[in-house]
Image (cartoon, helix red, strand yellow):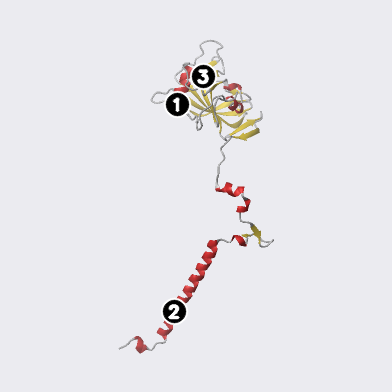
Amino acid sequence: MKSQIEMPPGFRFHPTDDELVNHYLIRRCAAQPISVPIIAEIDLYKFDPWQLPEMALYGEKEWYFFSPRDRKYPNGSRPNRSAGNGYWKATGADKPVGRPKTLGIKKALVFYTGKSPNGVKTNWIMHEYRLANVDRSAGKKNNLRLDDWVLCRIYNKKGRIEKYTHDGKSLEFHEMEMEPETSMLGHYMDSPESFPRLQHTDSSSSEQVLSPEFKCEKEVESESRWNYLGNSLNFQFDSLDKFLEDVLFEPESCLFPE
């Protein structure tokens, strides 16, 4: 499923945790309309994370989904984290969302390929948002539904679409599309003639020097200034020598008149 939503140029969807819970998750759980249906509804745990970007309604480097969440055991409250050819594993502590009253809980998870507990860690990350203060006890036997809806943010921390095999090896990937950047380096790369050519002075030496035609004007100017400075110093030293000669060989009567 490709993205069907056309947003104006420059639009970016980067909601905060509070905005995700207050304006999207709460409204979806209450069956209230959302002004722009920008978040797709899928059963996220049926897929590998690298399959999800194609199913999102919008996203460039991160993708958002509403998804149901099931129990691992019929009478328990632990969620089933199996997904596609691997599983999601929680990491870090839960974070409350909402002030002064906590309205939601944010949990971070990492995707592993293979079977638990011997799975291989990948670079795929999920932030899962669920409502706080909700009764999740199993009301009926064999009721596997834990939450009708949770909100999930999916992204790859390397900034690319990585696919993995069952044994955790990276199968293939491609970089996210990014706008080209222009720089002075790019200017030089476009015109190789702009680079000074290097020539070897001796095959036995590793030193390289610039070809003579690229001698810098600053260098020529500095040489002339050094020559001028040297001539001035020589003149001053000559004058000093003459003065000392006059003083040393002058008659004492001239130096100390009575």
At mark 3, the secondary structure is strand
| Cα separation between marks 1 and 2 | 84 Å
Q: Nearer the viewer, mark 3 or mark 2?
A: 2
Q: Amino acid at mark 1?
A: Glu
| Cα separation between marks 1 and 3 | 16 Å
Using a 10 Å C-alpha cutoff, classify the residue at mark 1 as few (fewer than 14 neighbours), some (14 to 19) or many (20 or more). few
At mark 1, the secondary structure is helix
Q: Position of residue 144 (x, y in %)?
A: 56, 15
Badge 1 or badge 2: first in the primary sequence: 1
Badge 3 or badge 2: first in the primary sequence: 3
Question: Which residue is labeled 3 in the image?
Answer: 149
Badge 1 or badge 3: first in the primary sequence: 1
Q: Amino acid at mark 3?
A: Trp
Quarter where residue 121 is shown: top right
Q: Residue at x 63, y 31 (%)?
A: 163
Q: Amino acid at mark 2?
A: Ser
**Above or below — where is 124 with respect to 206?**
above
Q: Position of residue 205 (x, y in %)?
A: 66, 61
Using a 10 Å C-alpha cutoff, classify the residue at mark 2 as few (fewer than 14 neighbours), some (14 to 19) or many (20 or more). few
Q: Is residue 128 visible?
A: yes
Which of these two is toward me, 173 or 150? 173
Query: In the displayed structure, does residue 166 sit left or right of residue 64?
Result: right
At mark 2, the secondary structure is helix
Q: Position of residue 188 (x, y in %)?
A: 59, 50
Question: Which residue is labeled 1 in the image?
Answer: 19
Q: Residue at x 61, y 61 (%)?
A: 213
Quarter where residue 204 is shown: bottom right
Quadrant in which the C terminus appears: bottom left
Q: Residue at x 57, y 35 (%)?
A: 159
